[in-house]
Amino acid sequence: MKVAVFSTKPHDRKSLTEAASEHEFVFFENRLRPETASLADGCRAVCVFVNDELDAATLRQLAAGGVELVTLRCAGFNNVDLAAAAEHGIRVMRVPEYSPHAVAEYCLALLLAANRHIHKAYSRVREGNFELKGLLGFDLHGKTVGVVGTGRIGRIFCRLLRGFGCRILAYDPYPHQEAIELGARYVPLGQLLSESHVITLHCPLTPETHHLIDDAALARCRDGVLLVNTSRGGLVDTEAVIRHLKSRKIGGLALDVYEEESGIFFENLSDEVIDDDVLMRLMTFPNVLVTSHQAFFTAEALANITRVTLGNLDAFSRGDAGNATEVGSR
Ligand code: NAI
């Protein structure tokens, strides 16, 4: 089967070409958007990633070009218009779980780096500055950490936190017994916001969770709260966050995702003028740490993404229905 692979990076090309597979891959570095969808003409499937835009216009163009399957190399599918996919008879598959450990461990790394300013210390000592000024952090031990979303990643994060001796508050419309056994206490979101020293987001981006962290939510938080987002950028109203950084309400911010990351994250723009004033303002704060959507990026996760993606393509070409990795478009 001929498959157009969008948003290709060297690691995608390497893992898909090295895997034993009967499929013919055509690699594009471009993101999939309405303007680039015709590149997939003549392919039965497209293979996409987090920042490809599978809106109604893209899906219409894909269907016209003969595409019958979208397979995502990620878990989240907030970038796919499922109703439009169903309308065009395009099936949508994903990699529901490739390494929740990769993301939970990275989230902890970001939290620790932001709290203890490890990123600043690293560059400081390399320039011969051994001062401690500005590097003061706080003990995680005994602090209250609010975990929003206790799915696969959120629960592993709770397990990691247990080792630090934190008090864990959780919010999830669907509480999970394992999180309770790991010491988390489910509370309403408002209580989590007002009692937590650290808040970390692990819920999907949906219309209900869009801008979950907005001005009103931030106003409820403790002064000096440390906010971590390794889930999806759209969960956080970035302009509201900037207002609360300026007012000193937010003590620290660590982001691996950003609501307008598409077209910026994963790219080398070091020689370019970056037009996004919100992102650039965000990165001027001394207490903000931004990374470029890399929480998933471990060898184990990449191997699992390749294995499940090839399984999706095989299942589709065999005509299997009701695959567990299928997103409910049919
Ligand atoms: P999951 O589906 O196992 O868990 C999500 C949890 O969020 C569920 O327990 C669900 O009930 C809960 N939830 C739904 N609506 C909620 C709300 N309004 N408030 C609080 N909780 C809510 O998903 P998983 O595997 O744990 O992944 C979580 C998110 O992490 C994904 O949706 C994805 O956006 C993000 N992610 C980010 C990566 C990165 O590289 N930065 C990599 C992989 C996932």
Image: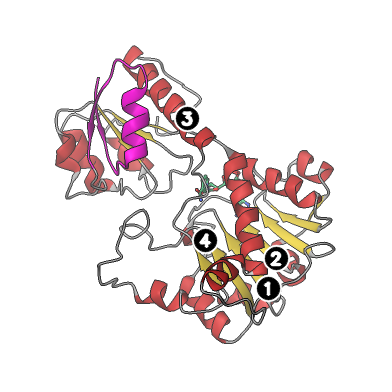
Q: What number is the disc on residue 303?
A: 3
4 or 3: tag closer to the N-terminus: 4
Q: Nearer the viewer, residue 275 or 181?
A: 275
Residue at 75 percent across and 71 percent down: it is 138
Marks 4 and 3 close (CB-CB < 8 Å): no
Q: Nearer the viewer, mark 1 or mark 4?
A: 1
The answer to if 136 sits in the magenta stretch is: no
Residue in view at x 54 percent, y 53 percent: 231
| Residue farthest toward the front in the current orientation of the protein | 128
Q: Residue at x 51, y 44 (%)?
A: 296
| Quadrant location of the N terminus in the rendered image | top left
Q: Position of residue 285 (x, y in %)?
A: 51, 79
Of the residues shown, which amino acid type is indicated by label 1? Val
Q: What amino acid is found at the position of numbered circle 2 in the picture?
A: Val
Image quarter hosting the C terminus: top left
Q: State which tag comes first along the sequence, 2 or 4.
A: 2
Instruction: Name the quadrant containing residue 276.
Output: bottom left
Q: Quick one: 194 or 101, which is closer to the camera?
A: 101
Which contiguous range is marked in magenta? 1-28
Question: Considering only order in the chain, which callout, 2 or 3, is on the residue closer to the N terminus?
Answer: 2
N-terminal of the pair, mark 1 or mark 3, is 1
Q: Amino acid at mark 3?
A: Ala
- The residue tagged 4 is 235
Mark 2–mark 1 Cα distance, whole angstroms, equals 6 Å
Q: Give the left or right position of residue 124, taking residue 317 as reference.
A: right
Discs 2/4, front: 2
Q: Position of residue 140 (x, y in %)?
A: 77, 63
Residue 164 as seen in the image, left or right of residue 228: right
The answer to whether the residue labelled 1 contacts the one labelled 3, judged by CB atoms less than 8 Å apart, is: no
Question: Are the residues tagged 2 and 4 within 8 Å (C-beta)?
Answer: no
